[in-house]
């Protein structure tokens, strides 16, 4: 029996694969601390859970509209205006089963064989695979540690060709935690405005988890509004990873295409989760500030602990909940009889010898780095970083 060519070339998600390895070791009685997955360690706020319970009692048990309940679309429209200074209408909004499906829908709708999609590195693990599943070719543009893992307008323009169909990036960034400033985004927008056929896919799932200036949406710049898709969802900011609600704001023609595609794949997203999402999005962002404050405290602790490890070089993340240290100083060295040749080797070594699950940066397009999530208790983070430090003592 034979799989299709597209499935033969598809790789499992590295973050999910590492989490699976960690769970397997835990099932064997090994004390593994998992810092590999991008999932808040908080419970969904009670006021959102109560809205879901009410939706059940109100019998929201039938098929929802494919693109989302009108009331949820209206809440999303108000949220975009309140938080992002972007004006959308109902026919520009599509609600999906998580932001991942939103991204998949958009790329399937616009990418053809032979077209290119620019992906700044480091990038979220699924971007390149979804581009390839859609028939396109990823074009990687390197954001270096020295540049805080961000690309410049000159780099962007140099990557654009007559085959370029889109650019996709996240800010705040998973995995680096970097956040493009308003001026930096404005400069990128000025380049992209010269190429109106290039679709900008802005993944803003971490927008509320920032440590400093408020996140800026590229669609708020009028010159690129008509070519921008804003991706968002409730998983990260509201600790609703399992509720599976994501959404887009997009040009109406593209939103309609995503709705058509979704109608043949999943139909509408979960009805109860949609009703709860209305309550979440209508709430003032201050209602989730306690989570952001906790992440901010952990970030400071993690930066301190990471800087005590001689072979780690770290930038200061301005958002999300990850450290993304350059670990190339470990390459070629031997620890506890194990030679480390690359970040993949290091991630596996840390799992086996420190019992801490992290993810190799190669999965994110940055082969010299590893990603460490600090969406965990301070106690577990302190223990994990101590284990990593001790495992990286040369002997």
Image (cartoon, rainbow, N blue to C red):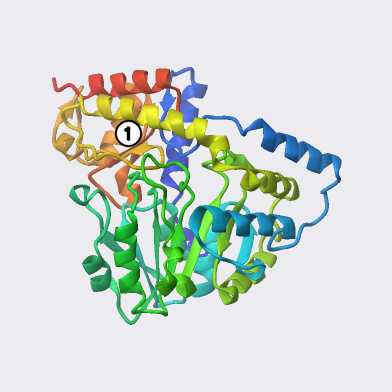
**Which quadrant is home to the N terminus?**
bottom right
Answer with left or right where residue 355 lies relative to residue 110: left
Residue 280 place in picture, x, y as percent: 64, 43
Answer with left or right where residue 173 lies relative to residue 82: left
Residue 59 place in picture, x, y as percent: 86, 46
- Residue 9 visible within the image: no
Q: Is residue 172 above or below residue 317?
A: below
Name the residue rendered at 50%, 60% in the picture: 85
Residue 69 place in picture, x, y as percent: 73, 58
Q: Is residue 352 above or below residue 205?
A: above
Q: Quadrant of residue 320?
A: top left
* Crowd class of label 1 (few under 14; some 14 to 19; many from 20; radius 10 Å): many
Answer with left or right where residue 180 lies relative to residue 142: right
**Which quadrant is home to the C terminus?**
top left
Of residues 244 and 126, the one drawn nearer to the viewer in this rendering: 244
Of residues 79 and 153, the one drawn nearer to the viewer in this rendering: 79
Q: Secondary structure at mark 1?
A: helix
Residue 160 place in picture, x, y as percent: 30, 74
Q: Is residue 342 above or below residue 339?
A: below
Answer with left or right where residue 295 lies relative to residue 80: left
Name the residue rendered at 20%, 22% in the picture: 336
Count the labels in the image.
Answer: 1
Q: Quadrant of residue 323?
A: top left
Q: Quadrant of residue 384?
A: top left
Name the residue rendered at 17%, 31% in the picture: 311
- Residue 63 visible within the image: yes
The residue where tag 1 is placed is 348
Name the residue rendered at 65%, 70% in the picture: 91
């Amino acid at each position: 029996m034979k799989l299709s060519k597209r499935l033969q070339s598809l790789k499992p998600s590295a973050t999910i694969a590492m989490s699976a390895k960690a769970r397997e070791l835990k099932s064997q009685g090994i004390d593994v601390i998992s810092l590999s997955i991008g999932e808040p360690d908080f419970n969904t706020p009670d006021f959102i859970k109560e809205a879901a319970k009410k939706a059940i009692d109100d019998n929201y048990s039938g098929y929802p509209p494919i693109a989302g309940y009108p009331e949820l679309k209206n809440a999303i429209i108000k949220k975009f205006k309140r938080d992002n200074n972007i004006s959308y209408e109902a026919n520009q909004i599509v609600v999906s089963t998580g932001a991942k499906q939103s991204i998949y829908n958009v790329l399937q709708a616009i990418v053809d064989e032979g077209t290119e999609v620019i992906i700044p590195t480091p990038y979220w693990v699924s971007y390149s695979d979804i581009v390839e599943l859609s028939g396109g070719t990823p074009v990687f543009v390197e954001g270096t540690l020295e540049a805080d893992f961000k690309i410049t307008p000159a780099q962007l323009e140099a990557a654009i060709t007559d085959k370029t169909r889109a650019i996709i990036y996240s800010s705040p960034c998973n995995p680096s935690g970097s956040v493009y400033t308003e001026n930096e985004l404005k400069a990128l927008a000025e380049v992209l405005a010269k190429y109106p056929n290039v679709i900008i896919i802005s993944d803003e799932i971490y927008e509320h988890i920032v440590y400093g200036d408020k996140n800026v949406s590229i669609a708020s710049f009028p010159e690129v509004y008509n070519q921008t898709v804003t991706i968002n969802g409730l998983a990260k900011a509201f600790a609703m990873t399992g509720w599976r609600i994501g959404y887009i704001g997009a040009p109406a023609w593209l939103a309609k295409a995503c709705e058509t595609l979704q109608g043949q794949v999943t139909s509408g997203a979960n009805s109860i989760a949609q009703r709860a999402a209305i309550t979440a999005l209508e709430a003032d962002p201050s209602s989730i500030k306690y989570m952001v404050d906790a992440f901010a405290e952990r970030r400071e602790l993690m930066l301190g602990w990471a800087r005590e490890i001689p072979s780690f070089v770290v930038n200061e993340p301005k958002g999300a909940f990850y450290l993304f240290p350059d670990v190339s100083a470990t390459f070629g060295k031997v620890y506890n009889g194990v030679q480390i040749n690359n970040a993949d080797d290091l991630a596996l070594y840390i799992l086996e010898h420190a019992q801490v699950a992290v993810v190799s940066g190669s999965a994110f397009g940055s082969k010299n780095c590893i990603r460490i999530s600090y969406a965990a208790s301070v106690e577990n983070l302190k223990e994990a970083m101590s284990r990593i430090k001790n495992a990286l003592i040369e002997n």
